[in-house]
Amino acid sequence: MRARILLLSWCVLMCTLTSARAQEVQIGVEQGVDVENNVFNSAANPTTDGRYRVTPTLEIAQPESDLTYRLEYRPTWTGYFRSNGLNGLDHFVAGQGRYQLDGRNAVSGDVDFIRIRNIRETTFLDAAGITQSTPTVRGETQRFNTNLRFDRSLDATTAVSLGLNYNRWDYFDSNQVSNQGYGAVLQLTRALNGRTFIGGNVDLRYRAFEGTLFSPPSSSTILNANALLSFDITPRLSLFVSGGPAGVFARQTIVDTQTVTRWAPFNDPALCPTGPCGRAWSLAPIGPSLCGTFDGDEILTSCSPVSFNESVPGFPDDTKTVPVVRLNAPESATDALTYFVSAVLNYEFRIGSVRLVFSRNEDGGGGVGATTIRNSGQVIYNRPLSDRWRLQLLGTYWVRESVSQVPVSLIEAERSAQVVTTALGDQVFLAEASQVIATQSARTFKQSVGYADVTLVRQLTEHSRLRFRFRYYNQSIESVTASGPTAFDKFTGGIFFDYEFDPYKL
């Protein structure tokens, strides 16, 4: 909702500033069919299916004025041929604008909003103990990002700019952590000659991660200073590079004295086969038992209470305030020094072009609830084969990694003298919370993604074209919270038809 309000405010601002110059409306449609051998991103037993996709496109632009802007909306409907319950819409909205205040000053901004469904394959054990799998829509991912920048020319060769940024990631999946970030950057550039620009900037960012059952609230502040260089090496070869040190200052919530559920959950062997982790012990334990919880939530909420007589006094609403015992001196602050860099190399052939890109920077975290550094590389090659045929090659590889010390709290529960009777008539002892043990856990996350696209474009008419695309995609995730690394790959091939109507001038 917040993202939509900000997007609407941005659109209202742009419409308010619109001058009397002509606006253009561009309407089009993209549709096609592709086949993929692993449509549910499964690490085992991949499923092949076909999909039909249709994307109507709407663009509103004002290209020639003191105010220039472009707004774009692209919803995509995807229908699966064989899999049921997965058809649906994804959304993409984007806009850019620039307003020239006078000969020396300008204001510019951009905004983008995406909401996509996460299609996965869920595995489970059936009543016979056999592993089964089912495709499902496991929540949605929503991202909102907006930038606002003020540019001022100090003289014929020197310019200064101030930029502000807000971005938010929302994950509609309990296993991922939503976050929002704020940033500001001050930059100075100077032209040494017609081929060389130099400069520098200082970038300050703050990101807040929400708390979940598996991750307490945390935040990070990043201070980054970069040197800039833009150099036209030859008329066909150009280089842009920026980079510099970055300090990362992370802060986490540490559990304090807590009011928790007094009695531990009942021990259901089917749900908790490894020991006493239910609302009561069905077997007498030897010594205390540790029942895990995070940030003071009730004891082992992942185990469901079952088979209890509802007449048991004080169960399960009775609470108790317990003290905290700290182990390994858990700290709320983690500071680190790293570096960020961005480099772009462009080369124009006699026919065709190639573009190489490398970057290392902080990103939205991918739902892991910790500061994440992403290293990425990309190569883009374009070449016309004839008047109507064009070849496009794209190769991308990136690695996102985070290592953080996360505060973890464990509730120590001791067997009490309280005996209760279950619905089955068994008498068992309750486990009573005695204290919270606060410690630290190293949380690591590493995700690597690589894919390669081969696209052939056939221009049919001035307004229509065919695209033939083949893609290979590979992903691997390693996390301390998982039993081991998970990886999958997939192949996709399809044909798409694009048509754009003549622009309409308002």
Image (tube, helix red, strand yellow):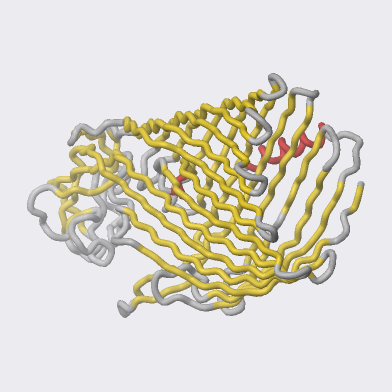
Instruction: Name the residue at 67% across, 65% down.
Output: 77
Q: Is residue 462 left or right of residue 348?
A: right
202 up-or-down from 146: above or below? above
Quadrant for the N terminus, please: top right
Instruction: State which quadrant residue 383 falls in.
Output: bottom right
Instruction: Name the residue at 11% across, 54% down.
Output: 285
Residue 279, position in %: x, y? 25, 53
Foreground pick, 44 / 136: 44
Foreground pick, 287 / 428: 287
Instruction: State which quadrant residue 488 falls in.
Output: bottom left
Residue sitting farthest toward the front: 234
Residue sitting farthest toward the left: 286
> Is residue 381 among the parts visible in the rendering?
yes
78 up-or-down from 160: above or below? below
Residue 286, position in %: x, y? 7, 53
Q: Is residue 367 left or right of residue 166?
A: left
Instruction: Name the residue at 53% across, 39% down.
Output: 241
Instruction: State which quadrant residue 58 falls in.
Output: bottom right
